Image (cartoon, rainbow, N blue to C red):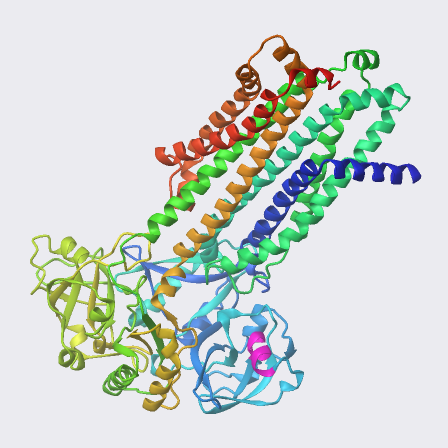
Amino acid sequence: MRAVLQDLRYALRQLRNSPGFTVTAILSLALGIGATTAVFSVIYAVLMDPFPYRAPERMIHLRIFDRSGQEAGFGLTAAQFNVLRQSPVIEDAAISDDWRLTVTGHDFPEDIQGVYFSSNAFNYYGVPVALGRGILPSDAQDGKDPQPVAVLGYKFWMKHFGGDPGVLGRTIELVRKPYTIVGVASSRFTWDDGDVYLPIKMTSEGGRTYYANYRLKPGVTRKAADAALQPLLEQFAKETPKNFPVGGFRLAMVGINDYFIQRLGGTLYLLFSGVALLLLIGCGNVSILLLARGTARQHEFAVRSAIGASRRRMIEQLLIESLTLSMTGAALGVMLAYAVLGKIVASLPEYSFPHEAAIHINVPVLCFSVGVAMVTGILFGLWPAMQLSRPEVNQMMQSGSRKVAGSVRGRRTLGALIAGQIALTLLMLAGAGAALEGFVKMSKVPLGYDPHNVMSVGIPVHDGTYKTWATRANFVEQLRAKVAETPGVRMAAISMNATPPSNGFNTHIEILGKPASQEQIIGINYVSEGYFPILKIPMAAGRVWDATENHNAAPVAVINQTLARRYFPAGDAIGHSIKLPDVKDGPPYNLTSPNTTGWLRIVGVIEDKLDDGLNKPVTPEMFVPNSLFMGMYTQLLVRADVPPLTLLSAVRKQVSLVDADQQVIGNVRDLEHWITNEPEWAQGQLISWLFGSFAVLSLALAAVGLYSVVAYSVAQRTNEFGIRMALGAQRTHVLKIVFRATIASVAGGVGGGLVLALALNRVVAHWAEGSSRDPLMLVGVTALLAVVAAVACAIPARRAARIEPMEALRCE
């Protein structure tokens, strides 16, 4: 034990005497461990184990696709749901629906997310409640009004009741109706982001349809379940044709996490590849530093051996030194992992990952990363001792020479490590360059509209209110007019589903005088006439309908240039007529004007704007008066003379003057924030700054590693350089010697990095929206790496060239 403490004190003294080496090695390990652990922790929580539900791998959603391959909506009646859940391939099923509700008792009605469950839902999901009970079968019997009971969401409970366990039995008023609180959901139970969970009324009245979630029986594949349920759904389509797409459909099941894997999976795996490279580069850097430093200490080993130190004793001492270095780097890496994890989670695109996911540091990955770092430190820390702990003492003591790497094998090992580090760094730089290039390109794409000082105010219509087309159309128009009167508001318009950059409902169309085709699919948008001037969308031809036409639900339409070019290549779109066969009246929720099912005359063409995200081509879209179709939700676009969110309170007050119970949706944003919250924008930003940070760190580590090797080489060859200069060698000759020793490793690394960048181009380009084959980008990152490598070599080389011959000859 005494020997261990003695070795530890000696190790600390050695590390303290070499602060540059110590800090660089520790940071190299910490950066690799911290970044790798943080990113994989997100991958594990989001993609591998996101849900707390019972058997989530067997939970599925039913999706149907029409003959053109477009996903189509459908609904099941209560009777059909009960038949479907009895299928031999289905283990269990539960119905869920969501609706915006209000909590009264405040200045304005507070908007909350209400989720309606069938009576077996809490048992289906299999997550115990945090307090009280869930919804029971006695709370919702088929055909009867459900009991007025509510289960609070955990966050809602904490926010409104401060986590008070005495909340059970108290009453909460939702849309003027009292509900008794019977339970609080688990902190990880966030299905549909519900604030309150209520029992649903299962009824066949009024053509009501339901959406259900299903769990397959063990051993049943999705393909087998598709084949088993397809005939059943086809039979349902014959019974209730209005609830299914026209012309046939195909059933396809998807897992509850498939959407998130598709949206975020590639991004996270790309980031993990980046941090894995950073870990490799960091470990490589430590290897280079330890090998170079160990080689520089060969004279020390010779002296210690000469005075009687055993080989085992020297190895033990170096082992303590390596362990001290590795454990310090590992400890710092653990702290860094927690800090990086918080930053990554805050930067993830909204709604791109399950909110049930519990994102925290993944202990197995942390242990693996620490283990890799420890092995690296120990292996390359002991390597010099193994090689040099049995030196030719007489030769070493007499010659006093300290040659770089001690041997040709040592020089080759260091050269290979440097080349590998340079190659990985160039690959990282190419990936970061591609990501940044794609993000900059996306940020500069023309939108086709002006989002500045415009906000979208969501208005959910309460269930059971404004039941006729006329009263609902009048209500929405009153809201628009009242909001337009708000001081500071320049104008207001109705946009039921048309807020860019992702807007519209996909639907089939028929064009008068042309054969119908299932491939004629466009985006349909329901807006008032003020939509176009609010967003400053230029007209390419024709006109927009006026306020009178909007009020009367006139059968008119405005299309974009893409639609005009695709279906009217002769340039004669104005005056033609289009029909929307899929838009149907569905009271009491969807109410249509009689003009909706007829032919709509094209009166104008607008210039193209982004309508399907920020990185996809513009698709055909059509705009019609919002009064043609009145759903249960609409949006008011508000253009202001000031930052629009500062007027939100005044806008809410104006809405309450029209209907005291009408709330404004809780999450109101201006359009510029809508854009930055688009998945492709948020993902591009996340990849750019993380990959850019990793690339900068990799470049710094590579530069330090190269500098260290050259600096140790110069220090060991000081006597040699002195002799050369005493014999007449010029300083430029010394510079050439130093550069020549490393140019092969750097050139090999650059060549290997270019090969890797080109070989992995397809992967990087797909997820980073850029291309690592862009010649200018590749030339740029190669030049940057070359300059950094040259500087890292030039500093110690310049020092070597400035050595005074007499001083160098006396240094031994």
Direction from residue 552 to residue 28 in the image, left or right: right
Res. 364 visible in picture: no
Q: Is residue 89 above or below residue 699?
A: below
Q: In the picture, residue 10 is in which quadrant? A: top right
Magenta range: 152-161
Q: Is residue 348 above or below residue 655?
A: above
Q: Residue at x 86, y 27 (%)?
A: 312
The tally of labels here is 0
Q: Is residue 773 above or below residue 603?
A: above
Q: Main secondary structure of the magenta part?
A: helix
Quadrant assignment for the N terminus: top right
Q: In the picture, residue 669 is in which quadrant? A: bottom left
Where does the image place residue 139, in percent across and percent down from the top left?
A: 54, 84
Where does the image place residue 804, in percent across and percent down from the top left?
A: 64, 19
Where does the image place residue 663, in percent across and percent down from the top left?
A: 40, 83
Q: Residue at x 37, y 46 (%)?
A: 438
* Magenta highlight on residue 156: yes
Direction from residue 21 to residue 103 in the image, left or right: left
Q: Residue at x 48, y 65 (%)?
A: 87
Quadrant assignment for the C terminus: top right
